């Protein structure tokens, strides 16, 4: 059975997950917009002993692909630090966005930078690269570029996190998304099950609850069912519990 969980506040994630009926928890270990090294979580022992899967999301500012040394080098460092901290509390994976470059001329260097990140370090837990919603020079928005990324990193056993909002807003058809991703990566390790506040191919990363977004709730459930992996719901808090309940009814 797959676990259906939630992205929750990091302060005390296990009670937060229980409060919304989540069977898995995803959270940050540090400021998602900062460069600080994560410190041991105040509830580390309880998290290690948790009977639900734990996933950690790397800070949003991580951009391993960029050719800007002042961003790429600290991105590699903080990715390594978060991987170590996530492994220490028994997380199943560390999710990180695919990142972007400044121009189409730099795309090949962006893919090469991802290759170097895995070539230079063996991470202590699976790194799950997540598709992103916007940006003309994003590494993992369009699936033709995802294929090029996997040509660069696939040999290292890298994992993949499929975000439904990001795929839809990024211009990818959700009715065939699982089959197309599997043809490229051979795996989907986690689904971020989110509706979108915006229309198809908007490029906007704005999550919505299932009953108010522009993606049919049944389509989100179909993606989760086809992927067969754990699911994390990252929708707004007021309706997150209802979204989890809907998925559980569709997938159980």
Image (cartoon, rainbow, N blue to C red):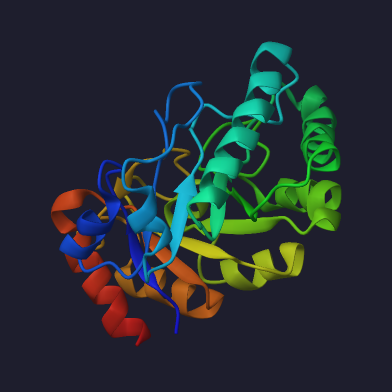
Image quadrant in which you'd find residue 101: top right
Look at the picture and state if 141 lies above or below 211: above
Name the residue at 32% across, 41% down: 42
Q: Residue furthest front?
A: 45
How many labels, in total?
0
Question: Which residue is nearer to you in this view: 120 or 205?
Answer: 120
Give the quadrant of the N terminus.
bottom left
Horizontal relation, residue 208 to residue 161: left or right:
left
Expressed as whole percent of the image width and height from the top left, the position of residue 44 reads 38, 49
Image quadrant in which you'd find residue 76: top right
Expressed as whole percent of the image width and height from the top left, the position of residue 20 reads 19, 63
Question: Which residue is nearer to you in this view: 216 or 186?
Answer: 186
Horizontal relation, residue 40 to residue 246: left or right:
right
Image quadrant in which you'd find residue 62: top right
Look at the picture and state if 125 lies above or below 218: above
Give the quadrant of the C terminus.
bottom left
Name the residue at 86% across, 41% down: 119
């Amino acid at each position: 059975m797959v676990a259906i969980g939630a992205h929750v506040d990091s302060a005390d994630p296990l009670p937060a997950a229980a409060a919304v009926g989540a069977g898995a928890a995803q959270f940050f270990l540090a400021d998602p917009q900062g460069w600080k090294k994560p410190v041991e979580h105040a509830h580390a022992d309880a998290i290690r002993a948790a009977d639900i899967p734990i996933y950690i999301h790397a800070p949003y500012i991580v951009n391993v692909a960029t050719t800007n040394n002042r961003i790429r080098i600290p991105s590699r460092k903080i990715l390594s630090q978060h991987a170590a901290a996530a492994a220490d509390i028994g997380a199943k994976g560390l999710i990180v966005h695919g990142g972007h470059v400044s121009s189409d001329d730099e795309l090949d260097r962006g893919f090469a930078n991802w290759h170097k990140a895995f070539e230079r370090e063996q991470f202590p837990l699976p790194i799950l690269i997540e598709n992103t919603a916007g940006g003309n020079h994003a590494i993992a928005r369009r699936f033709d570029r995802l294929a090029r990324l996997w040509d660069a990193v696939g040999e290292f056993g890298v994992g993949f996190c499929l975000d439904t909002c990001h795929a839809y807003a990024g211009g990818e058809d959700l009715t065939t998304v699982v089959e197309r991703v599997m043809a490229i990566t051979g795996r989907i390790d986690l689904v971020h099950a989110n509706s979108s506040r915006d229309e198809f191919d908007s490029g906007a990363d704005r999550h919505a609850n299932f009953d108010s977004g522009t993606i049919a709730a049944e389509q989100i459930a179909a993606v989760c069912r086809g992927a067969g992996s754990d699911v994390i719901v990252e929708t707004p808090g007021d309706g997150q519990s209802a979204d989890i309940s809907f998925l559980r009814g569709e997938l159980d």
